[in-house]
Image (cartoon, rainbow, N blue to C red):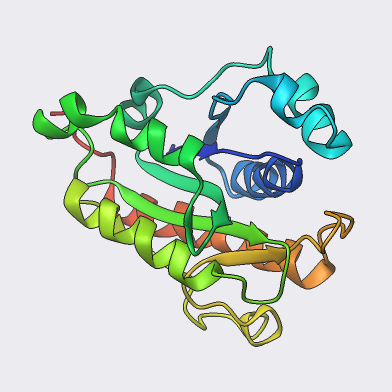
Amino acid sequence: MTKLAVIYYSATGHGTAMAKIIAGAAEQAGAEVRVRHIAETRDPESFAQNPAWSANYDATKDLPAATGDDIVWADAVIFGTPTRFGSPAAQFRTFIDSLGGLWAQGKLADKVYAAFTSSQTAHGGQETTLLALYITLMHFGGILVPPGYTDPLKFADGNPYGVSHITGPNNQNPIADETAAALEHLARRVVTIAGRLGPADPA
């Protein structure tokens, strides 16, 4: 059974919703799944005036937070981060930057990786965020499995690098049907390719 870790940072809850869709599809595809959020590094008082951010923080703060061990455990990892000025969010980068010891031991290599993101506006740095993340995964020695246009539904969501969601200026947009379908496709594709490659060697 393929082991998939879905590791994400979410401020206003869209990443949390996207991670749940991926996890459900991966489980249906036969994977053992761990969903782990990346812990908030900001003081909650600093976003107290943002109801969506506060609500997502309250809903996830007591759930298991991601650690490097979750990546070591997995055969495949799907990362999620909102875009911040065309790059992954600082909270996400803080987690990635904590993995140096595991990287030095080779424990992040030879795993399947893919990613999803979100932004308030159309485009809004979504593609550059995914590409910036993938550069890091190349340093890991990871095996990148983007969705490409491997299913006709990708012509609806339009992102061959991963999956992206437009949250809207007030973070009001729910996950659209075509985005949910693209997330499910990404999950199935990652599980399928990881299964063909076989279990990752934890080194």
Lateral position of residue 68 relative to residue 166, left or right: left
Kindly indicate the quadrant of the structure image that contains residue 128: bottom left
Instruction: State the image coordinates of residue 64 (x, y, percent, origin top left).
Output: 58, 16
Instruction: State the image coordinates of residue 40 (x, y, percent, origin top left).
Output: 59, 26
Kindly indicate the quadrant of the structure image that contains residue 39: top right
Instruction: State the image coordinates of residue 82 (x, y, percent, origin top left).
Output: 59, 52
Residue drawn at 65 percent across, 59 percent down: 118
Residue drawn at 17 percent across, 34 percent down: 103
Q: Is residue 34 visible?
A: yes
Instruction: State the image coordinates of residue 183 (x, y, percent, origin top left).
Output: 64, 60
Q: How many marks?
A: 0
Locate the C terminus by quadrant: top left
Kindly indicate the quadrant of the structure image that contains residue 24: top right
Q: Is residue 202 visible?
A: no
Lateral position of residue 48 relative to residue 87, left or right: right
Residue drawn at 39 percent across, 44 percent down: 76
